[in-house]
Image (tube, rainbow, N blue to C red):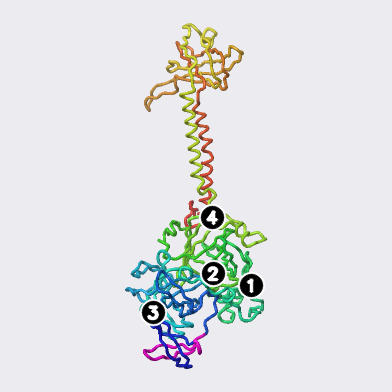
Amino acid sequence: MSGYRGSCPSCGAAIVFALGTSLLRVCEHCGVAVARKGANLAAYGRVAAVLPTPSVLKLGMDGRYEGAPRFTLVGRLQLDYGSGTWDEWLMGFDDDSWAWLSEAQGRFHYMAAVAVPPLPSFSQVRAGQTLDLGSGTFVVTEARRARFMTAAGEMPFDIEPGQILNYVDLSGPGGQFATIDYGTGNRPEAVYVGREVSLAEIGIHEIVSEEDRQVRVQGQNLSCPQCGGPIEVRVPDQTQRVACSYCGSLLDATQKFAVLNAAEAVGFEPTIPLGTKGTLDGVSWTAIGAMERSVTFEGVRYPWREYLLYEPQRGFRWLVESKGHWSFVEPVNAGDVRGRATPSHRGLRYEHFQGGQAVVDHVVGEMYWAVAIGDFVTTADYIAPPHMLSFEEDEHNNEITWSRGTYKEPSEIQAAFGLAGRLPRRDGVGPHQPSPWQGRVGAIWAQAVFGAGVMFFIFMWLLFGSMHTVYQQKVAIPPRAISGSPEAAVFTEPFVIARPGNVQIKLSAPVSNSWIYIDGALINEETGGLDEFDLEAEYYFGSDSDGSWTEGSNVGAAYVGAVPAGRYVLRLAPQWPPGLAVGNYDVTVRSRVPRFAYLFLATMLLFAWPLLAAWGAFRFHVARWSESDHPVFQSGE
């Protein structure tokens, strides 16, 4: 870095601009902001001390990013957007170029300057709008004004501390991030594009130790100005609002805990006590705050609770409980969300579940933004169980956020936070609760189809490979025989059934507008065992005003089950209607005959389980969507 040396106009101490392109530097000796005015230096006045934060970074650290020359952290800028503060670190490269490393809520974004494309003025930009930055299309996530609070080291611009700066943050595909800097005016002055990075990616390995970066609140005994109850602040550097856990008053943590909203009682008691640590997905989180929000639909209020979790290296996350259903919520880059009607994220397509206006009803503990009772946002929830994608837009259309929730079983929450008491009982089906039938119904159907195929194969094998005709005869009825008389009855010739199994006796008779009935018996000649059966064939035909018709069949069959092997005869005693005698009939005996009715019954029993599974899955689906904006069954007026 080429550098520039001079003397502080305020105290006369030597002052060095490490970057030849830097235009502002805070004197290390007197704390005055010194600006370069050509060959001269001008003092802007003393700047406030940098707010202490638990940052793992500090000025003078160096590293390397993606093959670029080595860099050194030469400047630190703190900005306040009214609902919180964040740090910007100036990275000075050895070739005199520079970039920004943004640090907020435990996340880091590398930001390099690019050419400024044609862009709308600041007053024309709205959250949710898409802009082409030349390197791709980005989504506007935030359009705000921020105050240049303070700085340390040097800055690449000449702006007096305390000025109001206009900026627009955008999110692009693949985790890209961008900022449009409008300075103090309405026209874009600079564009920075980058992405979220880890410190390892930019070559910073020796970070500030946890002990050195631990921030302690000034004064050991903080108390609520409203009720005098003790207040414990666990993340003092990032906390904007504190809600007293004794009286419920909302305090401004940035203004010596001034009372913003006095209350006489806490709105609710958190199920997870504040300060409790819990391990989820291998990370130890601390519950530092909780709030209750709600939506009102057709006069009915639907509340839920959100627990703010904190971990120094990962920042903030949320644990949301609604009707006993729990969800772990993480932020999502808006640029990685495609579409609004049915958005997709990380290869998953989400369905719209419900929308509304969420209102903050109660707050307990710490919050990292300037929350207020009555704040509301427009929301839309989309589901792809076990995930929920949530969209929020603030009431002024200045900011949009996307987040992704993952469903957690109550038992996991109870074990993670060591909760001895019972959690709220689950009511109904959660919007993104995984179905117990998910992935199972198809497998059950596949198993049933396979089983049916096996049974059909066995049936066909029995039909063509195991069934045998053991006897066949045409029986003549004496011309003068009387129906049901002994003269009409006959005993067949003996026949042998070689293998045990069922026996089919089949009757075929040339009946025409008539019938024949046979009272029969299968007799074992060796044991005298007897199995009786009935056979009947009837066939009718004719015509009427509707045309020709037929009814019945000239074929009938009877089955005898579990017949042992042996030598058998048939006794056949026919009956027929008076005056309509049948001259003869055919009898056929088959052994080991597969029955289609049994195959059908077995198939139905086999498919009963997948049908029940499909019904269970359908009922779960109906219950899930019953309280959405798209219920399966619409209720009547």
Q: Which sits earlier in the primary sequence, circle 2 or circle 1?
A: 1
Circle 3 or circle 1, nearest the eye? 3
| Circles 4 and 1: CB atoms closer than 8 Å | no
Q: Which sits earlier in the primary sequence, circle 3 or circle 2?
A: 3
Q: Which sits earlier in the primary sequence, circle 4 or circle 3?
A: 3
Task: Say if 355 sits above or below 555 in the image.
Answer: below
The numbered mark at residue 245 is 1
Marks 3 and 2 sit apart, C-alpha to C-alpha, by 31 Å
Q: Which sits earlier in the primary sequence, circle 4 or circle 2?
A: 2
Left/right placement of residue 192 relative to residue 310 reads left
| Circles 2 and 1: CB atoms closer than 8 Å | no
Q: Which residue is mark 3?
A: 96
The numbered mark at residue 433 is 4
Quadrant into which the N terminus falls: bottom left
Q: Residues within 10 Å of mark 1 (few under 14, many from 20)?
A: many
Q: Which residue is mark 2?
A: 313
Amino acid type at circle 2 is Gln
Q: Residues within 10 Å of mark 2 (few under 14, many from 20)?
A: few
Picture quadrant of residue 95: bottom left
